[in-house]
Structures are given as structure tokens and as C-alpha cells.
């Protein structure tokens, strides 16, 4: 059965330069292993497609039931350099929550 991440987790995101930082936090501790299994760095990079030009790093935070992702080269150079309408990382967390995973 497929489920959107928004049904089992919430997210916070921001940016520093040209890197987006996304925290993905399970609502319930028992869903954390599902996040670890299904939400890989490769899958996050594929989800964002051409928006992320660089590497995606994933860090596991089991004591918080959370994952943290760094998306490098994701903002067209960053807020002061980019020609994008929204060159900040605040919306990336909401966009990640649209990802569908196997439950």
C-alpha cells in the first residue's frame, strides 16, 4: 500500500547558500524504520529531479525519529545569486512530503 510522507511525518526546511536542509520527522516512533527504509538519499534526489544539481546527503537521527537531508546545489546559486522566483529552501520540506512510499 502506498502512502504519502505527509501522512506519517512532518518536515522543516531551510537553506544556507546553495544548499537546502530538510528535516523529516516521524509522527510516531514506530514509523521511523519505514522512513529509514524508504526515504533514501537517492530517492530524494530523484524526487526533486533537475532542481538538485549536486549530491544529496542523508543523516539518521534515531533518538528523534528523524532524518536530515542536505541537498547541494539546489537553489540556483542561493538567495542572492539565483534568478529563481523563490530561491530559498523553505518550500522543499512541503514538496518532499508529497513523495509516496510503500507502507
Image (spheres, rainbow, N blue to C red):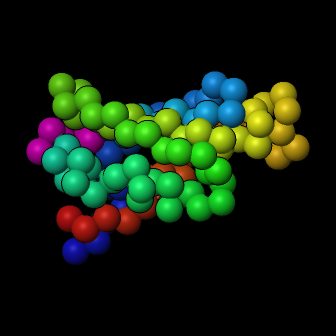
Q: Residue furthest bottom?
A: 1
Going by the image, does 84 lie left or right of 26? Answer: right
**Quarter residue 99 falls in:** bottom left
Camera-nearest residue between 4 and 49: 49
Task: Give the residue drawn at x 50%, y 62%.
Answer: 46
Residue 19 lies, in percent from the top left, at: 61, 33
Work out whether 38 lies above or below 9. Answer: below
Q: Residue furthest front?
A: 55
**Quarter residue 10 falls in:** top left
Q: Quadrant of the N terminus?
A: bottom left
Residue 39 lies, in percent from the top left, at: 33, 53
Camera-nearest residue between 86 and 59: 59
Task: Give the residue drawn at x 49%, y 44%.
Answer: 56
Residue 21 lies, in percent from the top left, at: 52, 33
- Asked whether residue 74 is drawn in magenta, I would say no
Task: Give the residue drawn at x 34%, y 52%.
Answer: 40
**Quarter residue 44 falls in:** bottom left
Q: Quadrant of the C terminus?
A: bottom left
Camera-nearest residue between 25 and 38: 38
Work out whether 69 lies above or below 80. Answer: below
Going by the image, does 23 lie left or right of 19? Answer: left
Going by the image, does 21 lie left or right of 37? Answer: right
User: Number of callouts in the render?
Assistant: 0
Residue 69 lies, in percent from the top left, at: 44, 38
Task: Give the residue drawn at x 25%, y 41%.
Answer: 27
Work out whether 87 lies above or below 15. Answer: below
Q: Look at the image and tell me whether residue 100 can be seen.
A: yes
Work out whether 44 lies above or below 79. Answer: below
Camera-nearest residue between 67 and 54: 54
Q: Look at the image and tell me whether residue 13 can be seen.
A: no
Question: Magenta region: which residues?
Answer: 25-31
Going by the image, does 35 lie left or right of 4? Answer: left
Amino acid at each position: 500500500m502506498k502512502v504519502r510522507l505527509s501522512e506519517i511525518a512532518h518536515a522543516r526546511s531551510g537553506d544556507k547558500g546553495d544548499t537546502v536542509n530538510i528535516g523529516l520527522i516521524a509522527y510516531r516512533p514506530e514509523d521511523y524504520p519505514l522512513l529509514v527504509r524508504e526515504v533514501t538519499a537517492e530517492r530524494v534526489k530523484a524526487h526533486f529531479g533537475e532542481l538538485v544539481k549536486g549530491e544529496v546527503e542523508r543523516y539518521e537521527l534515531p533518538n528523534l525519529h528523524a532524518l536530515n537531508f542536505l541537498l547541494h546545489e539546489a537553489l540556483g546559486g542561493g538567495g542572492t545569486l539565483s534568478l529563481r522566483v523563490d530561491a530559498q529552501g523553505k518550500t522543499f520540506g512541503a514538496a518532499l512530503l508529497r513523495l509516496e512510499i510503500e507502507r
